[in-house]
Image: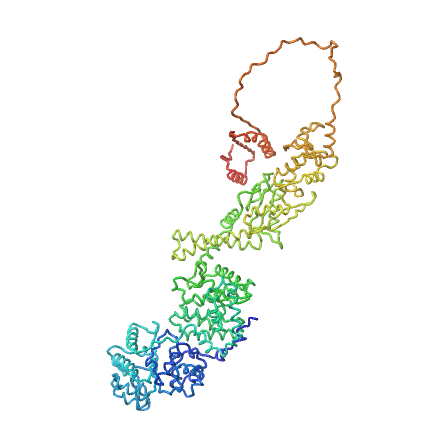
C-alpha cells in the first residue's frame, strides 16, 4: 500500500484551511453563549456537539446531570477543577446546551448514547443560570429592566425566575448579605428542574477584600452564599450546580487568591463531586473534531497507521518500546492525521508552562500548524513534530509565545528558516536534503526540549524519540542518526549528553571552541599535531628502513638501508584520481633530490599520500581537537568559569574530538604511491597509486600486503627472475661476469629494476640459484682468468662484497669443465728415484722421539676486531653473525656480547638535518651513547 500524504485523506475545517479562524474562537465564553452572542459553533447546540468529542469524563458528567434533572439521582454539586485550558468552560457549555436545548436530543451528536446509558427516556428542559466570575463586577450591578442585581444571589435569582425570583432575595441583594439556605431552597424548588453554572468563581472572589463592603457584598457574605447554595442544592432533587475552580498557580494569583481558593474548596468539599474533564488520550478526538471536517475513511487510516506500526517493529531497536505494542497502532489510528508524539509532547511537556492551556492551547497551536502545512502542500504521511513549519512567522510566534525570551533568534539560526544552519546542512548534502533530515530533526528537538529546557533534572529528548518524531516508513533511519552528529558538531545552542539532545537559550561551548579554532596557526601547532597523530597509526615493527612523516627531502636518507623507506607526504600534498599533481610533484622532488644533491638510491623510496578530498576534514578535526584541548586546559587552570555540567561536557567533547581525529587520519592517509620507469632510457617517472583500507586493524601491515599484491616490493625472488634480469641488463656484448654487489646496488638505484625488500632477498635468490647449474655461477673474486671461490651447482653460503661476481651460465659451464680436467705431469716426474747423482744427498737423521704429552692451556675468552667498508658493512655484518657469532651462540653456556663503534668525519661538518635524523635513529635503536663533536 502506498504511503499517501495526510492531505489526500483528511480535510481540515474551512476556517482552518483558509486561516479565517480567530485564536479567541478556541476560548469558549459561557456569557456570550448565555446571552446569544457567541459564534455559531458555540451558540448552536447541533454544531457545538458535532465538533465536540464526548470524553469519558464528560459522558459521566452528562449522565449525572441528566439523572439529576430527571429526578433520578445524580450529584447535586459538581466541581470542575483542571489546569488552565483543561476544558472546564467547554464542559459547562455542553451541560448548558443539553439542559436548555431547543431541539430534540436525538439531533445532538453523541447525546443519545449518554441518555440510553443513564436510562433517561425523556429529558426535561431546565431553567439555566450562568454566573461568570470574570464578567461580573463586585462594584457594578447587572441591570435587567427595572431590576438592579448587585450580588451573585441577586443575579442567580433573576436568571432562574426573572422578576419573581429576584423578589425572593431582593432584601439580601440590596443589603449585600447572604440569603439563608431555606430562601435559596425555595428559589430552586420553584425553578426546578434547573441548572446553575458558576464559571471562574475564584476570579470573582479575588475582587473582594476581607472586612470591606462592596455592592456585591463582603468577602464573608459571599463565602456564606457558597455554603448556603451548595446545601440548598442537596435538598432539591432536580437541581444541580456546576462550579469551576482553577488548578494552576498562574490562575490562582497572589496569596489572597490562594487563600480564597482554599476557602472555596473547603465549602465545596462538603457536598461536591470533583471531576477532571479531559484525559490526554481523549485530546486526539477533541482536536480532530474541532479542526477537521473528516479525518479519513477508517480503512485508509488503518492502512497508513499499519505501515508506521510495521516500520517501528522492523526497526525495534531504534524506537521506543511502546511502539512495539498493538496499543500504539490504535493510538496512531485514533490521532490520525496527527502523530501521537505531538500530543505527548504538548500534553506532557508544554502543558507545564504557565501560559499554555491544555486543550485550548493545543487547539490554537495545531490550528496554525495545520493551516500552514495545508497551504504549503505538505506531503508527509502524518503531521509529525518534524513537520512543524517553524520558519513560518505565525507558527514561530505561537511557539515562542509560551516560552521565555531569547528563543526567536535560536529558531531562525539553528532550527528552521532560510538563514538557519539546518538549511545549509540539508542543502549541502543530498542525503540529508532529500528527506529534510536536519530541518525535521531540529524541529523535533525544539518541540521535545524547549518547554522544559531549564527545569529538567535529566535534560533533553532521547534519540529514539527524535527518530519517532521524524522518520517515516521507507526512509533510512541512519540518515537521521548521521545528521544528528553533524548538527551536534555545528550548532551553538544544541546540547547533547549520551543519547539525549536539547536546545537551550544559553550558548554551548561550541562558539568558544569555534573562535579558538580559527586562531590555531598551521605551521606552529596544527602541522605538529597532525604529524604526531599520523605517527600513531604506524606500528613499531615493519620492514621499512624508516618511515618519514612530513619530512623535507634533505632529511630523508639516501642509503641502501635495511629496507625501503616510506615517505608520508604532508596534508597539503594530497592525491586524488582527478588531480594528482600536488602529491606526485612533492614526491618527485624528494625522489630526485636529497636537499640540493641528486638522490642516488631512488628505488628505495615509496610514498603515502593523503586523500585530497578528505584533507579539509582532517584539518578541521585537528583544529577542533586542539581548541577543545585548550578549553579543557583553561578550565583546569581556572581561566574559564564553567558549571560542573559544562566542564564535564568540555572534557567529553575533547575526548570525542580526539577519537574522531584519529579515525579521520586513517581515512585520509589512504593513497600508496609508487614511482616506476619501464626502460633505462625513460626520462619521465610514471606514478602508480592504490588505496589502502582505512578499516584494517594494522595500517603498516595493510601497506606491506598491498605492496606485495601490486608487486611493487619483492620479498621472495625466484632465481629465474634474477637470471632474466642479468641476461637483459648485464650479460651482453661478450660480458661473462658482473659484480654481484653492483647488481644489488643497481636495484636500489634504478626505477626500472625490481624493488627488493632488502639484500637478504637478493642473497637468498643467489643461494637458491647455485644449488643447480640452470642459472648462473658465483665467484668470491677473480685473478686474471681464474675465478676464486668458484661455485656452480654446489650451493653454499654467498658473501657479497666488492669482489663477488655473478658468472653467466655458459661461461660458468665452460669454466667448470676446464678446471675439472687433471693437470699434465711435470717434466722429470716419471716415478724413478732420481739417482743420477746430481742431487745432494741428505744424510740420515737420528730418530725423533715423540713429544711428551703436555697439558694444553684452556682458552676461556675470545676477542675479535674488524674494520668494514661503510658501503658493504651491512652484508659484511651478516656474514660475521653467520660465520663467527653463531659459532658461539650455538653452544650452551657461552655469553656473547657485541659492541659496534661507528666513527664518521666530514671536513665540511654535518648539517642540522642530518644530525637530527641520526640522533632520532640512534634513540630508536637504543644506542648507549651517540654524540656529534667539534674539532
Quadrant of the drawing holding the N terminus: bottom right
Q: Is 647 in front, or is 715? A: 715
Q: Measuring from the top left, give residue 498's x and y in whole percent.
A: 45, 58
Q: Quadrant of residue 872?
A: top right
Q: Residue at x 74, y 14 (%)?
A: 832
Where 555 falls versus 442 (above or below)?
Answer: above
Q: Is 931 in front, or is 40? A: 40
Q: Residue furthest front?
A: 119
The number of callouts visible is 0
Q: Residue furthest left?
A: 211
Q: Quadrant of residue 41?
A: bottom left
Where 717 falls versus 406 (above or below)?
Answer: above
Query: Left or right: where does residue 585 sit relative to residue 62?
Result: right
Query: Left or right: where does residue 732 sit relative to residue 23?
Result: right
Colour pattern of the rendering: rainbow
Q: Measuring from the top left, give residue 915's x and y in whole percent.
A: 53, 38
Q: Residue at x 52, y 60 (%)?
A: 482
Q: Quadrant of residue 601?
A: top right
Q: Is 922 in front, or is 786? A: 786
Q: Measuring from the top left, give residue 13's x and y in whole percent.
A: 49, 79
Q: Measuring from the top left, give residue 720's x and y in whole percent.
A: 69, 40
Amino acid at each position: 500500500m502506498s504511503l499517501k500524504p495526510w492531505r489526500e485523506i483528511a480535510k481540515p475545517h474551512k476556517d482552518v484551511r483558509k486561516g479565517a479562524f480567530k485564536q479567541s474562537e478556541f476560548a469558549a465564553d459561557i456569557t456570550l453563549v448565555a446571552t446569544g452572542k457567541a459564534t455559531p459553533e458555540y451558540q448552536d447546540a447541533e454544531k457545538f456537539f458535532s465538533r465536540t468529542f464526548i470524553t469519558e469524563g464528560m459522558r459521566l458528567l452528562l449522565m449525572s446531570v441528566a439523572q439529576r434533572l430527571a429526578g433520578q439521582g445524580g450529584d447535586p454539586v459538581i466541581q470542575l477543577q483542571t489546569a488552565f485550558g483543561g476544558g472546564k468552560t467547554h464542559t459547562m457549555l455542553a451541560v448548558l446546551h443539553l439542559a436548555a436545548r431547543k431541539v430534540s436530543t436525538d439531533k445532538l451528536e453523541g447525546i443519545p448514547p449518554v441518555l440510553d446509558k443513564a436510562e433517561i427516556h425523556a429529558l426535561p428542559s431546565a431553567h439555566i443560570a450562568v454566573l461568570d466570575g470574570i464578567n461580573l463586577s463586585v462594584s457594578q450591578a447587572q441591570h435587567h429592566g427595572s431590576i438592579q442585581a448587585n450580588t451573585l444571589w441577586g443575579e442567580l435569582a433573576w436568571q432562574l425566575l426573572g422578576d419573581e425570583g429576584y423578589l425572593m432575595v431582593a432584601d439580601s441583594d440590596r443589603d449585600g448579605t447572604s440569603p439563608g439556605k431555606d430562601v435559596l431552597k425555595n428559589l430552586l424548588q420553584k425553578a426546578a428542574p434547573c441548572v446553575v453554572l458558576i464559571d471562574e468563581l475564584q476570579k470573582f472572589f479575588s475582587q473582594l477584600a476581607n472586612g470591606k463592603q462592596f455592592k456585591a457584598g463582603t468577602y464573608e457574605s459571599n463565602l456564606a452564599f457558597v455554603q448556603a447554595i451548595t446545601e440548598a442544592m442537596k435538598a432539591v432533587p432536580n437541581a444541580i450546580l456546576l462550579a469551576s475552580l482553577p488548578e494552576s498557580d498562574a490562575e490562582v494569583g497572589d496569596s489572597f487568591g490562594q487563600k480564597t481558593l482554599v476557602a472555596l474548596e473547603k465549602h465545596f468539599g462538603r457536598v461536591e463531586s470533583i471531576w477532571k474533564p479531559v484525559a490526554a488520550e481523549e485530546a486526539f478526538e477533541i482536536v480532530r473534531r474541532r479542526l477537521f471536517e473528516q479525518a479519513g475513511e477508517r480503512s485508509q487510516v488503518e492502512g497508513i497507521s499499519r505501515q508506521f506500526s510495521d516500520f517501528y517493529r522492523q526497526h525495534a531497536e531504534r524506537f521506543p518500546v511502546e511502539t512495539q505494542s498493538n496499543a500504539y497502532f490504535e493510538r496512531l489510528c485514533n490521532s490520525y492525521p496527527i502523530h501521537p508524539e505531538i500530543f505527548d509532547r504538548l500534553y506532557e511537556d508544554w502543558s507545564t508552562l504557565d501560559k499554555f492551556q491544555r486543550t485550548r492551547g493545543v487547539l490554537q497551536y495545531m490550528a496554525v500548524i495545520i493551516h500552514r502545512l495545508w497551504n504549503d502542500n505538505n506531503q508527509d504521511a502524518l503531521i509529525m513534530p518534524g513537520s512543524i513549519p517553524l520558519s513560518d512567522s505565525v507558527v514561530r510566534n505561537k511557539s515562542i509565545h509560551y516560552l521565555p525570551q531569547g528563543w526567536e533568534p535560536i529558531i531562525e539560526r539553528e532550527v528552521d528558516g532560510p538563514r538557519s544552519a539546518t538549511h545549509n546542512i540539508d542543502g549541502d548534502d543530498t542525503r540529508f536534503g532529500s528527506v529534510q533530515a536536519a530541518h525535521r530533526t531540529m524541529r523535533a528537538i525544539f518541540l521535545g526540549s524547549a518547554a522544559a529546557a531549564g527545569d529538567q533534572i535529566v535534560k533533553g529528548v532521547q534519540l529514539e524519540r527524535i527518530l519517532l518524531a521524524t522518520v517515516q516508513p521507507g526512509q533510512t533511519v541512519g540518515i537521521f542518526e548521521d545528521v544528528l552528529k553533524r548538527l551536534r558538531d555545528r550548532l551553538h545552542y544544541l546540547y547533547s549528553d549520551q543519547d539525549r539532545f536539547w536546545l537551550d537559550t544559553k550558548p554551548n561551548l561550541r562558539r568558544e571552541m569555534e573562535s579558538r579554532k580559527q586562531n590555531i596557526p598551521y605551521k606552529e601547532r596544527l602541522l605538529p599535531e597532525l604529524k604526531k597523530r599520523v605517527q600513531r597509526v604506524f606500528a613499531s615493527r615493519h620492514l621499512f628502513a624508516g618511515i618519514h612523516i612530513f619530512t623535507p627531502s634533505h632529511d630523508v636518507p639516501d642509503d641502501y638501508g635495511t629496507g625501503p623507506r616510506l615517505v608520508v607526504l604532508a596534508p597539503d600534498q594530497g592525491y586524488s584520481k582527478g588531480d594528482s599533481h600536488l602529491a606526485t610533484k612533492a614526491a618527485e622532488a624528494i625522489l630526485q633530490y636529497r636537499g640540493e644533491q641528486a638522490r642516488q638510491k631512488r628505488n628505495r623510496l615509496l610514498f603515502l599520500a593523503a586523500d585530497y578530498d578528505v584533507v579539509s576534514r582532517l584539518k578541521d578535526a585537528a583544529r577542533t581537537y586542539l581548541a577543545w584541548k585548550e578549553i579543557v586546559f583553561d578550565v583546569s587552570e581556572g581561566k574559564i568559569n564553567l558549571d560542573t555540567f559544562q566542564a564535564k561536557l568540555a572534557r567529553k567533547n575533547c575526548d570525542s574530538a580526539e577519537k574522531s581525529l584519529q579515525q579521520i587520519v586513517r581515512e585520509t592517509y589512504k593513497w600508496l604511491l609508487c614511482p616506476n620507469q619501464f626502460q633505462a632510457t625513460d626520462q619521465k617517472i610514471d606514478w602508480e597509486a592504490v588505496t589502502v583500507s582505512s578499516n584494517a586493524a594494522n595500517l603498516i601491515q595493510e601497506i606491506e600486503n598491498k605492496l606485495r599484491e601490486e608487486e611493487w616490493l619483492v620479498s621472495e625472488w625466484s632465481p629465474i627472475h634474477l637470471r632474466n634480469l642479468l641476461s637483459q641488463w648485464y650479460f651482453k656484448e661478450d660480458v661473462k661476469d658482473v659484480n654481484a654487489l653492483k647488481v644489488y646496488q643497481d636495484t636500489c638505484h634504478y626505477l626500472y629494476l625490481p624493488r627488493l625488500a632488502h639484500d637478504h632477498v637478493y642473497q637468498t635468490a643467489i643461494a637458491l640459484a647455485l644449488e643447480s647449474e640452470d642459472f648462473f655461477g658465483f665467484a668470491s673474486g677473480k685473478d686474471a682468468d681464474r675465478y676464486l671461490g668458484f661455485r656452480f651447482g654446489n650451493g653454499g653460503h654467498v658473501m657479497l662484497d666488492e669482489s663477488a661476481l655473478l658468472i653467466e651460465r655458459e661461461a660458468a659451464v665452460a669454466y667448470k669443465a676446464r678446471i675439472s680436467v687433471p693437470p699434465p705431469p711435470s717434466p722429470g716426474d716419471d716415478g724413478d728415484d732420481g739417482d743420477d747423482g746430481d742431487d745432494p744427498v741428505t744424510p740420515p737423521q737420528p730418530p725423533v722421539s715423540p713429544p711428551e704429552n703436555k697439558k694444553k692451556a684452556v682458552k676461556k675468552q675470545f676477542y675479535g676486531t674488524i674494520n668494514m667498508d661503510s658501503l658493504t658493512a651491512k652484508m659484511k655484518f651478516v656474514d660475521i653473525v653467520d660465520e663467527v657469532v653463531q659459532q658461539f651462540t650455538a653452544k650452551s653456556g657461552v655469553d656473547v656480547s657485541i659492541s659496534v663503534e661507528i666513527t664518521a668525519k666530514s671536513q665540511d661538518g654535518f648539517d642540522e638535518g642530518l644530525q637530527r635524523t641520526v640522533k632520532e635513529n640512534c634513540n630508536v635503536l637504543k644506542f648507549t651513547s651517540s654524540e656529534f663533536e667539534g674539532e
